[in-house]
Amino acid sequence: MIQEVIVTTQNADGIAHIAPMGIHVKDNEFIILPFRPSTTLANILQSKTAVINYCDDVRIFAGCLTGRRDWPLSKTEKITGHFLASSLAHRELELLRIEEDETRPKLYCKAVYTANHTPFLGFNRAQYAVLEAAILVSRLNMLPLKKIETEVEYLAIGLNKTAGDRELEAWGWLMAVIEQHKQELAQA
Ligand SMILES: Cc1cc2nc3c(=O)[nH]c(=O)nc-3n(C[C@H](O)[C@H](O)[C@H](O)COP(=O)(O)O)c2cc1C
């Protein structure tokens, strides 16, 4: 099972970093798989800790991909670090072991603290659409433009039927980046 979450980490100076990651959950272990190079990876290797944030504000996922990483944070309970103030729940993790890989190492972690902050309010298609569009944006230079356009067209159906203000704002940020990418391709 892969869960799309926001991972918060911090460097040796205590500077927090937030990044969307698809984490794998197996038995009682949480596996974070950052592609090299990655600030999240460097921070976890240095601090041996991380926080996973379960979050339904998709602006944070889209924001991280479009240069908007400044989201309110609160101090963690059991480890030195931060969690997203708007998370529905968060888990504080300690690094157990690393499975090395040149491209994408696996960081096996265990939870040392979990807190629920606010209830999950149900699935929403627009949130799914924003997550998928954010993944497209994270792979903009690897995917053919035609595939991006086709997928955006499909995702826009669910988005337009079910979005609230947050989802529309997040979608707008992502579409601006895709538009910019199209213009750059046209000029190349
Ligand atoms: C839903 C979602 C899931 C993602 N999952 C991963 C992941 O598992 N590993 C990864 O390296 N990047 C993932 N990304 C892309 C990263 O969030 C993005 O490239 C980020 O900047 C990671 O690099 P950093 O640690 O240097 O911030 C994901 C993006 C989205 C929107």
Image (cartoon, grey):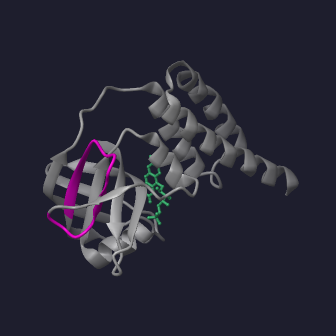
Location of residue 17 in the rendering, given as x and y in whole percent from the top left corner = 40, 65
Q: Quadrant of the N terminus?
A: top left
Q: Is residue 136 left or right of residue 71?
A: right
Q: Identify the image quadrant of residue 45.
A: bottom left
Magenta segment range? 78-93
Is residue 126 depicted above or below 32 in this figure? above
Is residue 152 depicted above or below 60 in this figure? above
Is residue 133 depicted above or below 161 in this figure? below
Q: Identify the image quadrant of residue 7.
A: bottom left
Kindly tell me whether residue 145 is visible in this rendering.
yes
Kindly tell me whether residue 144 is visible in this rendering.
no
Residue 109 in magenta stretch: no
Taking the spot 23% from the left edge, 62% from the top edge, the residue there is 108
Residue lying farthest to the right in this orientation? 187
Location of residue 142 in the rendering, given as x and y in whole percent from the top left corner = 62, 54
Taking the spot 61% from the left edge, 33% from the top edge, the residue there is 151
Location of residue 153 in the rendering, given as x and y in whole percent from the top left corner = 65, 28
Q: Quadrant of the C terminus?
A: bottom right
Q: Is residue 87 left or right of residue 132?
A: left
Taking the spot 46% from the left edge, 47% from the top edge, the residue there is 61
Q: Is residue 181 left or right of residue 20?
A: right
Foreground of the two, 120 or 85: 85
Q: Is residue 101 left or right of residue 114?
A: right
Location of residue 62 in the rendering, given as x and y in whole percent from the top left corner = 52, 47
Residue 81 in magenta stretch: yes
Count numbered badges in the picture.
0
Q: Identify the image quadrant of residue 72.
A: bottom left
Residue lying farthest to the top in this orientation? 161
